[in-house]
Image (cartoon, helix red, strand yellow):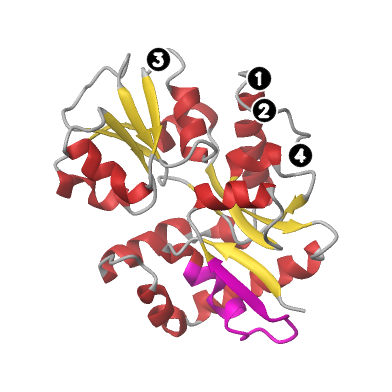
């Protein structure tokens, strides 16, 4: 029976899952792939729509009854956090309108922890690709962006008011837990799925040219050099294995969020 998999079309995900999706790993089942932005998968997973799914770490408190966190395939790292962008430098966000890419994204959870004493006036959830143009045109006072936007925001004439990754790392000393891979309980054996995905990551690194056409075809008009920057930043040691630092980062985020009343409490991973 084929397994359903949902990931984003971003280069890190297409690079990581190319071998698995294309049947290049012996002994793996057929995989039915769905591309969806993480704000979509966060809620789709809550409905149990996928067997394997990429979600935000911030969404885990609503999903861990039905899904198990896998220790491979996700997006964590250093120097890769969300940015708060504005048209002018040094904007005071108090009472302002901020565009965010999803209300259960890690980016938004980090923003809520960071902005606790800044009290933005209004939050608008909008598709990611509309955030930077919206800020540049003055429809939003600020925008919260992720992924490749950290390489391209200057093209829109925008300024980085805050790097939430730098803030998080300086405060915790831990990597930023962005995207997690979950396996649906009772449907997918987590040990088997971990091995499939780990092999897919290893194959991607061993032969990066094999996935190039697939990655570029789904890269949403990104230039090849931006695609490579994206992969280099988000596919790293934590993609292959979360390890203690990765699990500690997830614990720190979710325990802080629960203590602040922003998410339900979850049992620590460590």
Q: Residue at x 36, y 67 (%)?
A: 219
**Earlier sequence position, callout 1 versus callout 3:** 3
Compared to residue 2, the image places residue 227 above or below, namely: above
Q: Which residue is mark 2?
A: 255
Is disc 2 placed on a helix, strand or loop? helix
Compared to residue 140, the image places residue 196 above or below, namely: below
Q: Is residue 27 found inside the magenta-colored segment of the image?
A: yes
**Earlier sequence position, callout 3 versus callout 4:** 3
Q: Residue furthest right?
A: 186
**Earlier sequence position, callout 2 versus callout 4:** 2
| Classed neighbour count for the residue bearing mark 3: other residues with Cα under 10 Å, few (<14), some (14–19), many (≥20) | few
Mark 4–mark 1 CB contact (< 8 Å): no
Whether residue 76 is visible = no
Gap between marks 3 and 4, in whole Å? 33 Å
Q: Which residue is mark 1?
A: 259
Q: Which residue is mark 4?
A: 270
Gap between marks 2 and 3, in whole Å? 22 Å
State the extent of the magenta-drawn residues as a range: 14-34
Q: Which residue is mark 3?
A: 119
């Amino acid at each position: 029976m084929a397994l359903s998999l949902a990931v984003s079309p971003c280069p890190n995900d297409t690079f990581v899952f190319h071998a698995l999706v294309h049947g290049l790993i012996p002994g793996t089942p057929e995989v039915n792939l769905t591309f969806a932005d993480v704000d979509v998968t966060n809620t789709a997973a809550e409905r149990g729509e996928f067997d394997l799914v990429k979600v935000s770490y911030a969404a885990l408190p609503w999903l861990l009854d039905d899904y198990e966190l896998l220790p491979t395939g996700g997006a964590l790292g250093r120097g890769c956090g969300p940015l708060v962008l504005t048209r002018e430098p040094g904007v005071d966000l108090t009472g302002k309108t901020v565009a965010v890419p999803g209300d259960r994204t890690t980016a938004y959870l980090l923003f809520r922890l960071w902005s606790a004493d800044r009290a933005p006036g209004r939050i608008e959830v909008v598709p990611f690709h509309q955030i930077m143009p919206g800020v540049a045109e003055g429809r939003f006072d600020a925008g919260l962006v992720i992924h490749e936007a950290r390489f391209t925001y200057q093209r829109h004439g925008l300024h980085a008011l805050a790097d939430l990754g730098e803030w998080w790392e300086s405060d915790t000393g831990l990597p930023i837990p962005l995207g997690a891979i979950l396996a649906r309980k009772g449907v997918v054996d987590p040990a088997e799925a971990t091995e499939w995905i780990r092999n897919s990551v290893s194959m991607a690194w061993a032969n990066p040219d094999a996935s190039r056409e697939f990655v570029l075809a789904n890269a949403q008009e990104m230039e090849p050099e931006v695609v490579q920057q994206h992969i280099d930043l988000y596919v790293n040691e934590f993609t292959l294995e979360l390890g203690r630092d990765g699990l500690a980062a997830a614990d720190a985020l979710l325990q802080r969020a629960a203590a602040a009343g922003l998410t339900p409490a979850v049992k620590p991973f460590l």
